[in-house]
Amino acid sequence: SITDNTKLIFIANPNNPTGTLLTDSAVYDFLSKVPSSVVVVLDQAYIEYLDATDNATGWLVEFENLVITRTFSKAYGLAGLRVGYSISSPKIADYLNRIRQPFNVNHIAQSAAIAALSDETFLARSVAANTNGLLQLTQGFNRLGLSFIPSSANFVSVKVADAGATYQKLLEKGFIVRPVEMQGYLRVSVGTRNENEEFLDTLKSVL
């Protein structure tokens, strides 16, 4: 709950590590109940994977305490360049500018990000590949009789009998998944079709 000591609220939507998605109406209703003195950071790192209209930026006029953060590390494929950005009211942007680090994103990374924004074909191909990859993985989990959390991101959390042991066995076979802080779940990133197929075969062999 929000108290007098609350200064900042962080919402990842889609969420990491579950991949779950809050509806726009749920987020809007929540923002409407947050005092204007409390900053709300809405992390939209995976927004490009959503087949929906972006409404959050339109809320900035109404909620001056809202900060939206996004990244080029996911759908745009520029993780190694560490490029991200925030969208906020001029007031918050001014505060952030005062405390930012002296070293900004370098020129090469900025140029790559600008080029990525204009390459709509690559983005569409990246999103389509992720959609197909998620379907491939979840269908595979169904065949193996494993439950999973439906995801709106580029990963999916799957439940196994012994997450620690399964993680270690997969690691020994060259697959790095991520145990999450939920009992029995492993977070699996979407790969290429061949990678997904090989992973599912390996997962079956270690269960």
Image (tube, rainbow, N blue to C red):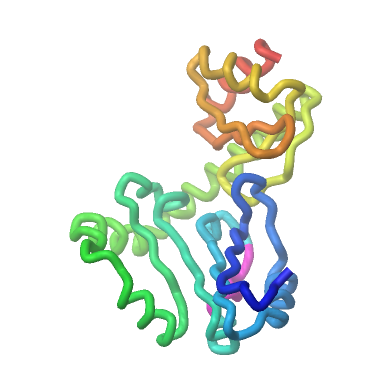
Q: Quadrant of residue 181?
A: top right
Q: What are the residue bounds of the magenta stretch?
A: 52-57
Residue 85 horizontal side relative to residue 178, left or right = left
The quarter of the picture where the C terminus appears is top right
Task: Identify the residue at image location x=54%, y=81%.
Answer: 65
Residue 105 horizontal side relative to residue 51, left or right = left
Is residue 165 in view? Answer: yes
Q: Does the segment drawn in magenta span residue 157?
A: no
The answer to whether 73 is drawn above or below residue 142 in the figure is: below
Residue 77 horizontal side relative to residue 69, left or right = left
The residue lying furthest to the front in this view is: 5
Task: Identify the residue at image location x=62%, y=56%.
Answer: 14
Image spot of residue 98 (x, y percent): 31, 77
In this view, the residue in front, 87 or 53, is 87
Image spot of residue 152 (x, y percent): 64, 51
Q: Quadrant of residue 145?
A: top right
The answer to whether 105 is drawn above or below residue 3 in the figure is: above
Image spot of residue 177 (x, y percent): 55, 29
The answer to whether 124 is drawn above or below residue 60 in the figure is: above
Task: Identify the residue at image location x=47%, y=48%.
Answer: 125
Task: Identify the residue at image location x=70%, y=27%.
Answer: 140
Is residue 122 in view? Answer: no
The residue lying furthest to the left in this view is: 107
